[in-house]
Image: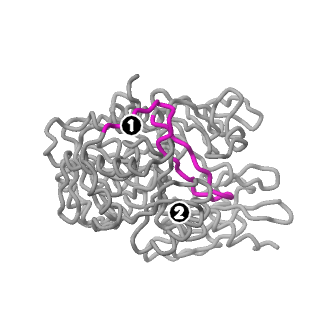
Amino acid sequence: MKNQNLFAALRAAFPKDLDQVAVETDDELAYSWRDLDRATAMMANLLASLKLPAGSRIAVQVEKSVEAMMLYLATLRAGCVFLPLNTAYQSAEIEYFIANAEPAVVVCSPKNFGWVSKIAFQAGTQNVFTLGDDRTGSLLDRAAQHSDRHEVAVLGEDDLAAILYTSGTTGRSKGAMLTHGNLLSNAQVLKDYWGWVPGDVLIHALPIFHVHGLFVALHGALLNGSKMIWLGRFDPKKVIAAMPRASVFMGVPTLYVRLLGETGLTREAVRNMRLFIAGSAPLLIETFNEWRERTGHTILERYGMSETIMLTSNPYRPEQGDRRGGTVGFPLPGVGLRIRDEQGNDLPAEDIGGIQVRGPNVFKGYWRMPEKTAEEFTADGWFRTGDVGKVDGLGYVHIVGRSKDLIISGGYNVYPAEIEGFINELPGVAESALVGVPHPDFGEVGVAVVIAKPGAKLEPEAVVGTLKAKLANFKIPKRCFVVDELPRNTMGKVQKNLLREQYKALFD
């Protein structure tokens, strides 16, 4: 049978000349395609030497480095299951993930070896290695003793490639099981849809414990045989300095805001760039417009999840339509998307409801949670994303928010994204978040948390007063707070669960 291992497809896309530069780092190191091939072979042979059972999980919590990326590829190559963990996770979280996933191997930063290894050994993990972002650690020391030739493990498209734990904003994190077929099918669709061409160079400035940096960006470059300019950490000046030598950049909205804060971001600086892609959190229309005015480029916004990789995208090619700010474009080829009400009825264009999807990119289910998996799929096999949105008359998908963020006030549905859109347009407002908190009369009411633009002075009462002239009364926040910053996760998403917790006792 044909080997469906994702690594086999990525390896087949390497350029014929393996001595070309594959990755150039911000500390002036260069790795060739031959280096990637040899190093992943040695790491895969190390994993094979451990005589691990089929489907063994390799849990990895390390700082971003080219070697960490090689470890991911080696895990695929060896036929094991990659389990990336956010570098911000602390002991209680790591304890949960290790107990839940039962990894055969744990790889951590050298500075965390003391406490991570203790948790891992107590949970029954046999092998704990270290990997630093400076090319040090026991993983590399051990791998160096193995051959640099390795036969890629033969796998089927339904075999597991990775388990990604969701952020766990509502209860315990769930491990989304992604197969080799899920990841490869999505990468192949995006290669065509985003117009990857020979000679493209990607600026990789995202973390690699998340779908965006690990799968979308990395697979895109590798499947196209494209060089990457690799930044260990996002630095707007370094990104701008790299742009004349690059053509593709992927970022979360926060990164675009920080780039716009740099005087070096000019049309001259981006003259060789082909495509700017944004995702992982909503892009403010103000950022979208300012980027276009400043650079002449229109950001392509797309939508995906840990459970599905990419689902929709604004068009790359002009003949497919315009890139529209405030939308996430059309369902990707092969992806089905429908909007349904709570009774399971299909909704017409412009009506808001729950987003359901299906396609070869949709995950296999939640790790060791069969009941939760069954709950999240409809009887006819569509995945309930938990996102609320609509499809407009032109077919563009709009995300209105998460279903868990929906506020039901006095029996009326209030969609935070709609209200935030109005608040964000007010003079002096940089960004806002609306959350629902308990209320004795209405059951739940909205509370607006707002950041002012530098130098602007906002009066909470004035914000609420202005909204009263624009919106129905049930949509008006009962209180408004002006703050210096909003709590965010590492991908720039506002952590509304923390805001709900902070303000939950306001109306007691």
Estimate the spatial distance between the alpha carbons at disc 2 and disc 1, rounded to whole Å: 56 Å
Instruction: Tell me residue 95's x, y (percent).
Output: 59, 65
* Residue at (53, 62) in percent of width and height: 426
Q: Decide: marks 2, 1 in contact (CB < 8 A)? A: no
Query: Residue 349 — which label?
Result: none
Q: Residues within 10 Å of mark 2 (few under 14, many from 20)?
A: some
Q: Is residue 178 magenta?
A: yes
Determine whether the residue tagged by mark 1 lies in a helix, strand or loop: loop
> Is residue 465 at all visible to an observer of this figure?
no
Q: Mainly helix, strand or loop, the magenta region?
A: loop
Give the image quarter of residue 257.
Answer: bottom left
Instruction: Tell me residue 30's x, y (percent).
Output: 17, 56
Q: Which residue is mark 2?
A: 426
Near-viewer residue (209 or 152): 152
Q: Is residue 201 left or right of residue 61?
A: left
Q: Quadrant of the C terminus?
A: bottom right
Q: Residue furthest right?
A: 441
Determine whether the residue tagged by mark 2 lies in a helix, strand or loop: loop
Near-viewer residue (164 or 430): 164
Residue bounds of the magenta highlight: 151-180
Q: Is residue 276 left or right of residue 124?
A: left
Mark with earlier residue (2, 1): 1
Instruction: Tell me residue 131's x, y (percent).
Output: 36, 64
Query: Residue 153 — which label?
Result: 1
Q: Amino acid at mark 2?
A: Leu
* Residue at (68, 66) in percent of width and height: 500
Q: Residues within 10 Å of mark 1 (few under 14, many from 20)?
A: some
- The correct choice, above or below, for 435 with respect to 110 in the image is above
Q: Nearer the viewer, mark 2 or mark 1?
A: 1
Q: Quadrant of the N terminus?
A: top left
